[in-house]
Image (cartoon, rainbow, N blue to C red):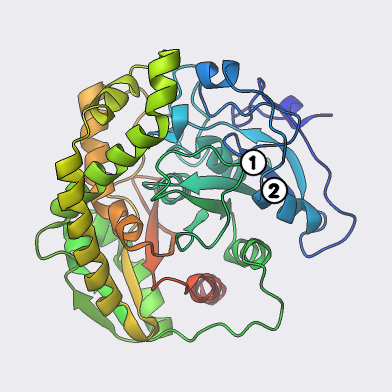
Amino acid sequence: MSILDHDALNAFCRHTHVALAGADSGPLAGLTFGLKDLYDVAGHRTGFGSPDWLATHEPATATASVATRLLAAGATMVGKTHTEEMAFSLTGENAHYGTPRNVAAPGRVPGGSSSGSAAAVAGRLVDFAIGSDTGGSVRGPASFCGIYGIRPTYGRIPLDGACPLAPMFDTCGWFARDAALLARVGAVLFSRDAGYQVARPGRVLVATDAFASTMPHVAQALHPAVERVTSLLGTAEPVTLSHEGLNAWFEVFRVLQFGDIWATHRDWITRVRPTFGPQIAPRFAAVATSNADEIARMTVARDDIRARLDALLVDNAVLLLPTMPDIAPFCGLPGDQTVAFRERALALLCTAGLGGLPQVSLPMASLHGCPLGLSLIAARGNDEMLLDVARRVEAAR
């Protein structure tokens, strides 16, 4: 039987379904995973959440190395998971293929664009799942669905065979229901052997401006989670991430992301004139207005932001902040409310993207019966340290 026979969550793609058996042995033998439908599988078309993309691209000639590494490690891929259209949103509501169901918050969005992967893990359809994270597409769904998720250091995991959104920010990411498995998958994707020595965490920093930017009661709900982490790692030191304000950082991210998206997809959009859904069409219309002078100014600003973050995160510091500003919104909100939520969320999420930093979201809190994630950020290359901290925090609960 296929995973499609068991999928009551609309997590998996019917239109691009493919399953691949893993090796008979390996560190992930016996485990199952879903693969976001922006990664190629040889001989099959990649949908990228868009019927027009599917119709205008030939079957892949090679399988993405992310998938081949997992298969060689013994994990079995049971199917392709839904992504939002062109991986360009944070709610998970695809106008063409529907919205995967969030079992942790019924009636609310699963988060996007790795919506199917997050829904499949939360709904126990697979052991783990692969997504991608450009602006927050693993971290946001992890928080909304009450699971673990990681955006790794930019560039650490190859993205061959992956449809790009904004290549200067795109990363592979993944989900699991427990921190130990999140780390096991990481060991495979990072190609680390069992004897690798993980760095010891240094200072613990709490981003006060990030907590202040959340919706009412979110910071309070996350306070016990912060205390659990600091009881394990040491006394927390309050810090301000952005002296200009996190909204200013979001503007830097927005301009650079939009410019990169337009440079990447301009030719295809101009030639095909795809029919985008009502949430995505206005975003691509905005992308098409990208301005070269503004991009140049924001590139300088990003370099300044990166230097500030590098200085904060020296000596294996661990930074704590909310993953998202609130619990998952209800499905089907009016467009203006969706835009307002997305912009508030990206003001938090853009920190790791601008710095090229690893970030792990831990399912450590809830509000109004819905999950909330607490995030850990560290310096570039300290992914394994964050995964180890997440594992230790989980074991100490």
Residue underneath mark 1: 35
Q: How busy is the neighbourhood of tag 1: few (under 14 within 10 Å), some, or many (20 plus)?
A: many
Q: Residue at x 38, y 73 (%)?
A: 379
User: Residue 308 lies in what quarter of the image?
Assistant: bottom left
Residue underneath mark 2: 67
x then y, percent, for residue 137? 43, 44
Q: Which amino acid does label 2 sit on?
A: Ala
Is any part of residue 97 visible from this angle? no
Q: Is residue 64 left or right of residue 152?
A: right
**Residue nearest the observer in this picture, 44 or 242:** 44
x then y, percent, for residue 299? 22, 54
x then y, percent, for residue 51? 54, 17
Q: Which residue is drawn at 64% across and 82% down?
A: 196
Which mark is drawn over residue 339?
none
The kind of secondary structure element at disc 1 is strand
Q: Which residue is drawn at 49% across and 16% down?
A: 96
x then y, percent, for residue 227? 34, 75
The kind of secondary structure element at disc 2 is helix
Q: Residue at x 24, y 59 (%)?
A: 219
Q: In this view, does 71 lie to the left or right of 350?
A: right
- In 3D space, how far apart are the residues under numbered discs 2 and 1 (Cα atoms)? 8 Å
Q: In this view, does 37 lie to the left or right of 277?
A: right
User: Residue 229 lies in what quarter of the image?
Assistant: bottom left
Camera-nearest label, 2 or 1: 2
Is any part of residue 284 visible from this angle? yes
User: Residue 340 lies in what quarter of the image?
Assistant: top left
Q: Of callouts 2 and 1, which one flags the residue occurring earlier in the amino acid sequence?
A: 1
Circles 2 and 1 in contact, beta carbons < 8 Å: yes
Q: Which residue lies furthest to the left in this view?
A: 244
Q: What residue type is labelled 1?
A: Leu
